[in-house]
Image: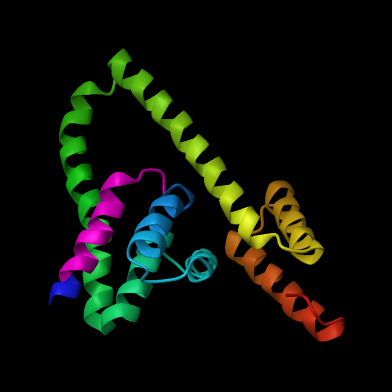
Amino acid sequence: MKELWELYISFFRIGILTFGGGLAMLPMLKYELVEKRSWITENTLLDCYAIGQCTPGIIAVNTATFVGYKRKGISGGIIATLGMVSPSLLIITVVAVFLQALIGEPLVQHALVGIRGGVCGLMLNTVYMLAKKSLVNPFCIAVCAGTFLLAFFTKLPTVLIIVLAGAVGVLCDRVIGGAK
């Protein structure tokens, strides 16, 4: 029971202290799950992120479910997921009540501009950390560049681009070997 409570509290903390979605949450996920709790490795976290891109739903929620399940089975997955989404549900409910009245206020508009800029900065930091760990050889760099170009210049669905990147990795390993 104690570990279920720890799962809930850890993911509640991640959910309440991070804004901006998957990439913006990655540093907090890393701190809480890898550095503080040692529940998963950094590579496992990156794998969760990659798998989360290919599955429906929010990456942070998928990660919470995965880590919770790994720690305490189905009940752990459910509790960790509830911990992750509880802050959003509470905050959205409160904000919805007050934002309607305040959305036109210049102070609120300026705050939102600042928040968007801050979230972009956090996302750039996360991309840098992810690239540092993931782009370990010319093959990975080429796949990254190709993926970026496909995403930037086409309207292909994200999941298709991720599947194509995985297929390229498998094909290169089969044909020329060593795509690791």
Residue nearest the observer in this picture, 169 or 43: 43
**Quadrant of the rendered image containing residue 116:** top left
Q: Residue at x 25, y 60 (%)?
A: 10
Asked which colour scheme the image uses, the reply is rainbow
Can residue 58 be spotted in the picture? no
Q: Residue at x 71, y 63 (%)?
A: 136
Q: Residue at x 21, y 43 (%)?
A: 91
Chief secondary structure of the magenta portion: helix
**Quadrant of the rendered image containing residue 40:** bottom left
Residue nearest the observer in this picture, 17 or 78: 17
Can residue 52 be spotted in the picture? yes
| First to last magenta residue range | 5-21
Q: Is residue 135 left or right of residue 58?
A: right
Query: Residue 112: x, y in percent?
Result: 37, 26
Q: Is residue 121 left or right of residue 38?
A: right
Q: Residue at x 20, y 67 (%)?
A: 6
Q: Is residue 19 above or below residue 142?
A: above
Is 76 magenta? The answer is no
Figure disc tally: 0
Query: Residue 175: x, y in percent?
Result: 86, 83
Query: Residue 25: x, y in percent?
Result: 41, 51
Residue nearest the observer in this picture, 53 or 9: 9
- Which image quarter holds the N terminus? bottom left
Query: Residue 12: x, y in percent?
Result: 23, 56
- Which image quarter holds the C terminus? bottom right
Q: Is residue 76 above or below residue 146?
A: below
- In the current view of this chain or complex, which residue is farthest to the left? 1
- In the current view of this chain or complex, which residue is farthest to the right? 176
